[in-house]
Image (cartoon, helix red, strand yellow):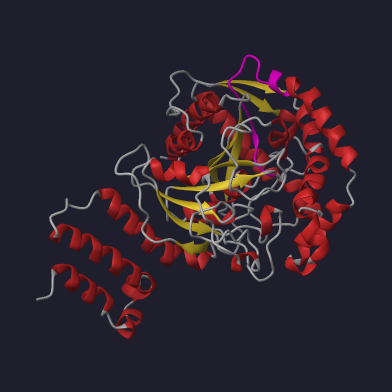
Amino acid sequence: MPSTADDVAATLSGLPAAEAVADPRWADLWPALPRLAGHVAALAKGIEDGGRLPQPANLDLLAAYEKLDRLGRPLGAVVQVLDAPARATDGPLLGIATAVKDMIDVAGCVRGDGNPTAMGGSPAAHDAPVIARLRNAGADVFATTSLLEYAAGAAHPDLPEALNPVRPDRTAGGSSGGSAALVGAGVCPAALGTDTGGSIRLPAHYCGVVGVKPTFGLVPLAGVTPLSPSLDHLGVLARDVQTAARVLAVLADRPAIAAAQSSKPRIGVLTGQLAHPALDPELARRTREVIERLAAAGATVVERDDDVLAELGDLLVPILLPEAWAVHGERVTARPGWYGADTLRLFQTAGEADPAEREGALRRRDELLPHAEALLDGIDVLLGPVAPFAAPELTPPIDTPEGEVEGLFTGPFNVTGQPAVSLPAGLTDDGLPFGVQLAGRVGGDAELLAACAWIERVLASAKS
């Protein structure tokens, strides 16, 4: 006699495709049904066998799988869909469906790096430490996400970049665009990304989500494809500051990072960035409006001269190029066809860089770091724009005029290693999301996120 589990599986898998497509209520759901059938049947069997009723977390994961097929795939944000993961039965992230940028080792999965040849490689034997920490904390690691090729600033021509969930005629950005797109589309509450010059914060700004680049070295990079080891950071894209703080605490293996501010923050406005000629006038105006709302809510607002950040930003490319060549140079020389044209051009340029310039840039960075930290004297956070523009149609390659300025405001904080957050701040006249960037002291991630949580609440109340 068939069991309830058998009945569930038969019912779901037996739905006629023609009827499903003909009925608009089923059209988008149809691709997800085979996967949903398996998971629902497994839940039913567990109940039949005397197990507990399914936790809400299990049902959240089912919903995430359904949204992944219905919303994530059309955006080009999904690389691999993982089987329902084994995870801890308890933990601070219990049931949080989490996606992972496809340059981080997940046991049993190929690390594709946004490159079609790499996608044919061997699966990872072990989880990267950050993935193991997520699983141990109860998170459901359920998908890997698309990215720009090797996180180097351009999509491979055979792997189009992820689309913006708010405006699919625009890019989700990069290089962590797939992660930003899934969070922005509501597929999952959190996703992992990497950030070498803005690759978490720029997509977060474009897609209207929270993007956290933590203090350099706070989160381990073992099992993650490098681009520039002196600049690479691993962080979080999330639906809100509280979720980002919870995930970051697990990734960093630190006590819970409380995203709560008991007092109104003291904010230093980066006046040079707001006056920069590359900044879109509307974004400059809207950022000033955000500052006015924060001041009206009780924040202390002062101005900060940010010339030192501009000089630090100029050091990014002299550091990045020789380090990228050290990672990719041997393969670029032996197998140039491995790479897409834009990425190949960038790495060939990297091969022409003078390693001595990197050493000089690192020395100058060390000289300027105390001055960058001094910008925070007497205040809690720095505030400025995230990018000079809202989401473009495509991510501009890093060696084009548009690409050179895209990371103008994010890059300095990769050089300093200070934590920085892209926080959603509204929509432009064209309906495109935009954010503001908040930065804190080296090691001051908890304080930065607490200030961000206060700002998030103020901006949310202004919308209501």
Q: Position of residue 222 (x, y in %)?
A: 59, 43
Q: Which residues are magenta?
A: 372-387
At x 87%, y 42%, the residue is 355
On the rendered structure, is 129 left or right of 377? left
Taking depth in this image into account, of 439 and 108 the one nearest to the observer is: 108
Q: Position of residue 264 (x, y in %)?
A: 49, 20
Q: Position of residue 97 (x, y in %)?
A: 40, 50
Q: Position of residue 461 (x, y in %)?
A: 42, 35
Residue lying at the far front in this picture: please name it.
125
In the picture, the quarter occupied by the C terminus is top left
The quarter of the displayed image where residue 142 is located: bottom left
Taking depth in this image into account, of 84 and 21 the one nearest to the observer is: 84
On the rendered structure, is 316 left or right of 164? right
Residue lying at the far bottom in this picture: please name it.
18
At x 90%, y 52%, the residue is 352
**Residue 261 falls inside the magenta stretch:** no
Q: Is residue 114 above or below residue 309?
A: below
At x 27%, y 79%, the residue is 15
The quarter of the displayed image where residue 187 is located: bottom left
In the picture, the quarter occupied by the N terminus is bottom left
On the rendered structure, is 9 left or right of 198? left
Q: Is residue 219 visible?
A: yes
Q: Is residue 346 visible?
A: no
Number of numbered tags placed on the structure image: 0
